[in-house]
Image: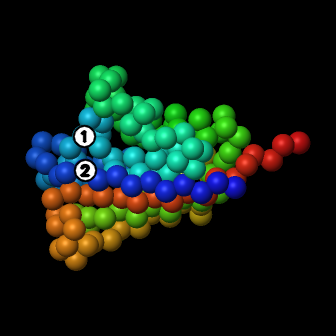
Amino acid sequence: MRIGHGYDVHRLVQGRRLVLCGEVIPYELGLLGHSDADVAVHALMDAVLGSLALGDIGHLFPDSDPAYKDADSMKLLSRVVGIMRDNGYVLGNADVTIIAEKPKLAPHISAMRENLAAAFGCGIGQISVKATTEEGLGLGGAGIGANAVVLLEEIKKG
């Protein structure tokens, strides 16, 4: 087994869509970033790559590469899942916490879990997505952050 942790944060700005765990969330602000800035998926990819001691998404998908401009983070996640499998592992479980003052994310959690389960090719019971605020502290509504923890299990041979 391998365990990995990931963290990401992006600033909220006008003129961008808000995408979290592959789900477009209706809101007047979106996250600033080179790709679609899906902080939850970015944290999750970093957790998977970290568990395999393969660095982070900045090395794999550099923001200096125009190929990743406005990239769909769920497509990037599918590449990370491929790397995970090529290294002989499957997802045991993933636990993602999104940190946001606004908007309220509870109505979108189920769809987020379904999106991630589909990306990993696993059951929804292996995916946890939670949302919390920082009670006006920390990011203070200027951005959204995410933490992710994964447990990878070695693929059984034979």
Q: Amino acid at mark 2?
A: His
- The secondary element bearing badge 2 is classed as strand
Q: Which residue is mark 1?
A: 33
Q: Quadrant of residue 131?
A: bottom left
Q: Position of residue 111 (x, y in %)?
A: 42, 56
Q: Position of residue 157 (x, y in %)?
A: 84, 43
- Marks 1 and 2 in Cβ contact (< 8 Å): yes
- The secondary element bearing badge 1 is classed as loop
Residue farthest to the left, as pictured = 14
Q: Position of residue 118 (x, y in %)?
A: 54, 47
- Residue shown at 20%/64% (left/top)? 139
Q: Residues within 10 Å of mark 2 (few under 14, many from 20)?
A: some
Mark 1 or mark 2: which comes first in sequence? 2
Query: Which of 156/112 is in front?
Result: 156
- Residue shown at 29%/39% (left/top)? 36
User: Is residue 120 visible in the rendered structure shown here?
Assistant: no
- Residue shown at 13%/53% (left/top)? 28
- Residue shown at 57%/44% (left/top)? 53
User: Is residue 76 visible in the rendered structure shown here?
Assistant: yes
Q: Amino acid at mark 1?
A: Gly
Question: Which quarter of the rendering shows the N terminus?
Answer: bottom right
Using the image, determine if residue 108 lies above or below residue 55.
below
Residue farthest to the top, as pictured = 66
Count all numbered tags in the image, as a single digit: 2
Q: Residue 133 got which mark?
A: none
Q: Which residue is mark 2?
A: 10
Query: Which of 49/39 is in front?
Result: 49
